[in-house]
Image: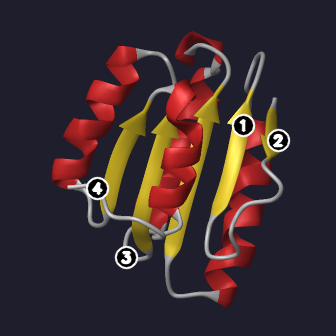
């Protein structure tokens, strides 16, 4: 399941995953992202994993990847919030091959991730 995170700054969008995630969940994310892209030239995106990456069905992973590629010119900042160190490490690698900035954050640093994603602060 994927839920939209409410009460975020207006220049960003965020989602929280829980339990098993399927293609339909990612379709929901894509439609919400489309609404943001229609309103702004930037895509500031936060994904909070409250589950394991193994809870994603293969189709969901493929759709999430296509979301990244389809809107490649819009990415400004994207934060992955998780306690899975492998995903944080992967985000560092992803940052080197994609336009925009991508950072991984531990769950305890959620507010830091929100501030960074919304461009309120810079982390160098």
The disc, 2 or 3, on the residue closer to the chain's N-terminal end is 2
> Residue 95: x, y in percent?
24, 49
Indicate whether 87 appears above or below 105. above
Please rate how many residues cluster around mark 4, counting C-alpha atoms within 10 Å: few if below 14, some from 14 to 19, many from 20: few
> Residue 20: x, y in percent?
76, 17
The disc, 2 or 4, on the residue closer to the chain's N-terminal end is 2
The residue lying toward the viewer, choosing from 75 and 69, is: 75
Element assignment for label 1: strand
The residue lying toward the viewer, choosing from 10 and 66, is: 10
Question: Depth-wise, is mark 3 or mark 4 nearer the camera?
Answer: 4
What residue does disc 2 label?
3
Question: Depth-wise, is mark 3 or mark 1 nearer the camera?
Answer: 1
Task: Indicate left or right for 83 with 90 as reference.
Answer: right
What residue does disc 3 label?
73
Circles 3, 4 touching at the beta carbon (< 8 Å): no
The disc, 3 or 4, on the residue closer to the chain's N-terminal end is 3
What residue does disc 1 label?
16
Circles 1, 2 touching at the beta carbon (< 8 Å): yes
Circles 3, 1 touching at the beta carbon (< 8 Å): no
Task: Indicate left or right for 42 with 37 as reference.
Answer: left
Please rate how many residues cluster around mark 2, counting C-alpha atoms within 10 Å: few if below 14, some from 14 to 19, many from 20: some
Which quadrant: the N terminus?
A: top right
Disc 4 from disc 1: Cα separation: 23 Å
Disc 3 from disc 4: Cα separation: 22 Å
Indicate whether 46 appears above or below 33. above
Indicate whether 5 appears above or below 72. above
At x 76% / y 64%, what residue is drawn? Answer: 32
Question: Depth-wise, is mark 2 or mark 3 nearer the camera?
Answer: 2
């Amino acid at each position: 399941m994927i839920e939209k995170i409410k009460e975020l700054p207006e220049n960003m969008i965020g989602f929280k995953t829980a339990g098993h995630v399927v293609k339909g969940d990612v379709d929901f994310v894509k439609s919400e992202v489309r609404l943001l892209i229609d309103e702004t030239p930037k895509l500031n995106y936060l994904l909070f994993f409250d589950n394991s990456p193994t809870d994603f069905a293969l189709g969901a992973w493929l759709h999430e990847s296509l979301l990244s590629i389809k809107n490649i010119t819009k990415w400004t900042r994207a934060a992955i919030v998780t306690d899975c160190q492998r995903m944080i490490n992967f985000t560092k690698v992803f940052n080197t091959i994609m336009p925009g900035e991508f950072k991984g954050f531990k769950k305890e640093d959620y507010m830091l991730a929100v501030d960074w994603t919304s461009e309120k602060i810079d982390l160098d």
